[in-house]
Amino acid sequence: MSAQPLLEDLRVVELGTGPFTGLAAMVLADFGAEVVWLDTDNASLGARSSYRVWQRGKQRIVVDLPELGARVRDLITETADVFITSLAQARLDELALSYASLSRDLPNLIMTHVTGFGRRHRFAELPLNEGLAAASIGRMMAFEGVARRPGPVYTALQVGTHAVSQAAAAATLAAIVDRDHSNVGRLIETDLLRGLLPYEMNQLLVQQLVDRGELPERRFDPHGFMPSINYHPVLAADGQWLQLGNLLPHLLQNFLDTVELEDITGDSAFDQLPWARDTVERYRGMLLAHMQQETTTTWMRKFVDHGGVAAHPYQSTQDALQDADVVANGHAVDAHGFRQLGVVARLTETPGTVQAPCDTVAWEDLASHSVPPGGNLAARLPLEGVTIVECATIIAAPLGVSMLADLGARVIKVEPMSGDPFRSMGGGTGAARCNTGKESVCLDLKQEAARSVLADIVAQADVLVHNYRPGVPERLGLDYASLKRRNPGLVYLSVNGYGPDGPGAHRPSTHPIPGAALGGVVYQLGDTLGRVDGIAEIRETARRLFRANEVNPDPNTSMVVATAVLLGLRARTRLGVGQAMFADMFGANAYANFDDFVARDVSARPSLGKELYGIGPFERLYACDDGWLFVYVPDDLSWQTLARWLNTNLLERFPSRDAGLRDGDALASALERAFLPISADHAETQLTPLGVGCVRADRSLPGAGLAHDPSFREAGLVVETQHPKHGSVLRHAPVVRLREASDFAGPCLAGDRTRQILSEFSPTSDAQALLDEGAALALE
C-alpha cells in the first residue's frame, strides 16, 4: 500500500456553493488533494449538516467577490492545478475568471465549470437548481403515477446533482492524468441537463424508431401500469415492504423456490412464456397473498441463506446508515464525531480517507503551492491512448465505461457468445445506450482457449472493469492476483451490488434493490410506508412504489464507476501502481442520497406534501390553465419579480421570501390561485427572461422532448451518430462537454470486432481456433 495520497500534489480551488461543486471537490479531497473552498455566500455550516460532508477536507475562505476578485484570480493563476466553479458564465466574465482569461496566464490550468443548462440553452441564465432542469427535460412527467393525482411529480432524489458532481470529478481526474503525460490544460463543462441524460436511458432512440415506423407506438397508463413479477414490491406479515429484483429467469426461479411458491412454479402456464395478461394477474395475486405469511426478517434470512435471490426491505436513508452491508463496506463510517458518507470507492493500494470537517482560514494561512511551469491547451481527448477491457453486462458498469469512451478511451467489451443479456431486452435500445463507443469481442469463457485469449488482451490493457459476483473471476482466471503477474500496472475494478464484504457480498442485485435500500424511493413516495388494508390498497401501494423505484440506481452507479477508474489511472500515472479496486451499487446510491447521508435524530429532508408538488412554496409545481409549471424562487429579487408579474397583493402579505417561508402553506395556496388561470407557456415565456425560475413541466416525456424539441439539439444535448442497424440517429451527448470532442461514436454490435481484436492482441493458435469456430461473427 502506498503511503502517498494519490492527489496530494494538487491544489484545487473551488468557487461555488452547494453540492454541485462541493461533492466533486470532496472526492478529490478524500484522496489527498488540497482544496481551497472560496465561500461567496458565507454559508452557515451548521444550517445544513450535510454541508459537513460535502465540504469536508477543505480550507474555507469567506470571500466578497467584487472586492477580492483580483485576489481570487491571482490565487488561481499562480497556485492552482484545478479550478472548479459553479458561477454563471456572465459572472466569470465580469470577474476575469473565465477560462479564456485564466488560460492566457496559466495554459495548463484544468477548469471545470458546472451550470444548470449549459451556455447555449435558452434557460442558460436561470438559477442553478435541479428541479428546473428536471422539469424542462420532462423528467417530472416520467414520474407521473407516483402521486395519485394526474400530472408531473416533483423528482425528489437529486440524481442530476449526483451525476454532474461525479462527472466533474471524473473528467477532472482524466484531465489530470493527461496533464501528467503532456502538461496540457483544458476546459471541462457539465450541466444539470447533461447530468440527467443517463437517466433517460433509451427513450430517445425508441422515439426516433417510432417516428420512423420501425417500432410501434406504445402507450401506457402511468396510474395503472403494474410491476412485473420479477420486480414486484411485496408486503410482509409485519407490515414492512420488500422489493424484489430478480430480473433474469434463473433469479426468478431462485426466488420462487426459496419462498416455496409451488402454486406458481407448478402451474400449467408457468413455462408458457411470455405469460398471458390473465396469467400475470393470477400470479400477482398469489405472490402478494403468499408474501404476507412471513415477516420481513424471516424472508430476508431465507434470501441471504440461499445467496441467489435479489430482495431488500424498503428503508429510509437514516435507516440505511445502519444497514449491515452499507457499514461493512465503508459506505457509512464513524469519523470525526458522527456517522457519514464514506469514500467513493475502495482502492487497495492508494485508499481515500474521510477527511475532517472544513476549517475556516484566512488568506495568509494558505501554504505556498507551485504548479508545473509552461504547458499548452489540450488538443485531444484526455483518455486517448488508454485501453479498457470491460467484462460486464446490463447497465451499471457498461454505462459507466461508455462515459470513459466519450473521454477518449478505447473500450473492448467482452461478451458471451449469446451477447450481453441486455441486448435481448427492449429491442436492444437500452444496450445501444450503454455500449456507445466500444468494440465488441464474443468469447465463450467456458473454453480454456477463450480464457487464454482474454488473458492476452488484458495483459496489454490499462484497465479491466467487471461485474462478476465474488468467486467467478477466480474460476475464470480473471482475478486480480492472476492478471497482475503479466500486467502489474493493471487498474482492476470490480463492480457489484453490495460490495465485497457484509452479508450481501455474494448476492445478486438489480436496480430496484439499492433504490429501496438506500432511501431514495421512501423519500420520493412522500409518505410513510406501513400496513395497508385490503388487497386493492396493497396493489395500489405496490404500483406507486414501482413507479417511484425507477432506473436511477443503475446510472447512479455508472457515474461512480467512471470516477473510480480514473482514480486508479491517476495512481498509476503518478505513483506507478496498479491495484484492485471496488465500487458497488449500494455505495454509489449512498452518494446519490448525499443530502441525507449523515446521521441525525430526524431526517433533514423536507416534506414533499401528500400530492408531491415539491418543497414549500418556492420550489414546487403549480397547475395552470393549460398545463403545469415548476417554479424556483431562491431569493428576494426573484420573489419580488414574480409577485409583481402575477399582479396580486402577494407582496403586501409576504413582503420577502422569508415572510413567505414563515407561512408557506398560505403562500402556496395563494400562488395556486394566482397561477391557475394563467397559460403555462405564457408564464414561462414572460418570466424566464426576467431571471425567474419558471419552467413548463408537462411538455413531453424525456425521449420525445429530446427527439423533437430543437432547443435541446441547439444546446448540444443530442448529437448525430451512426447506429449499425438503424443508420443515422441522435444519441445523448456526453455528460461532460470538451471542446476537443467532435465525433460521437454509436453503439457496437455483439462480436463486431472479434476477428480484428483477436488478431491484434492474441495472434496465437488458440485465437485462430476460436476464429475457425465462427467466433468472429457479429450476433446481430
Image (cartoon, rainbow, N blue to C red):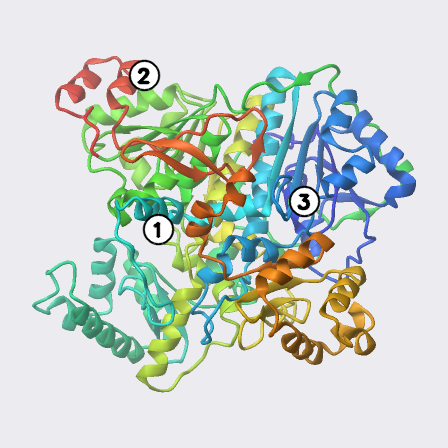
Kindly identify the residue that appears in the image at 60 percent across and 58 percent down: 695
Disc 2 to disc 3, C-alpha distance:
41 Å
In this rendering, the label closer to the viewer, 2 or 3:
3
SS assignment at label 1 = loop
In the displayed structure, 770 sits above or below 15; it is above
Q: Residues within 10 Å of mark 1 (few under 14, many from 20)?
A: many
Say what amino acid the circle numbered 3 marks: Thr
| Earlier residue among tags 2 and 3 | 3
Kindly identify the residue that appears in the image at 46 percent across and 51 percent down: 705
Disc 2 to disc 1, C-alpha distance:
32 Å
Image coordinates for residue 244, horizontal then vertical, percent: 33, 63
| Earlier residue among tags 1 and 3 | 3
| Residue, disc 3 | 21
Image coordinates for residue 25, horizontal then vertical, percent: 67, 41
The quarter of the picture where residue 35 lies is: top right
Which residue is more in the foreground, 179 or 317?
A: 179
Task: Say if residue 336 shows up in the picture.
Answer: no
Image coordinates for residue 510, horizontal then vertical, percent: 36, 54
In this rendering, the label closer to the viewer, 2 or 1:
2
Q: Quadrant of the C terminus?
A: top left
| Residue, disc 1 | 506
Say what amino acid the circle numbered 2 marks: Phe
Residue 435 in the figure: left or right of residue 308: right
Task: Say if residue 301 shows up in the picture.
Answer: yes
SS assignment at label 2 = helix
Q: Residues within 10 Å of mark 2 (few under 14, many from 20)?
A: some
In this rendering, the label closer to the viewer, 1 or 3:
3
| Residue, disc 2 | 761
Do the CB atoms of the residues marked 2 and 1 lie less than 8 Å apart?
no
Q: Quadrant of the N terminus?
A: top right
Q: Residues within 10 Å of mark 3 (few under 14, many from 20)?
A: many
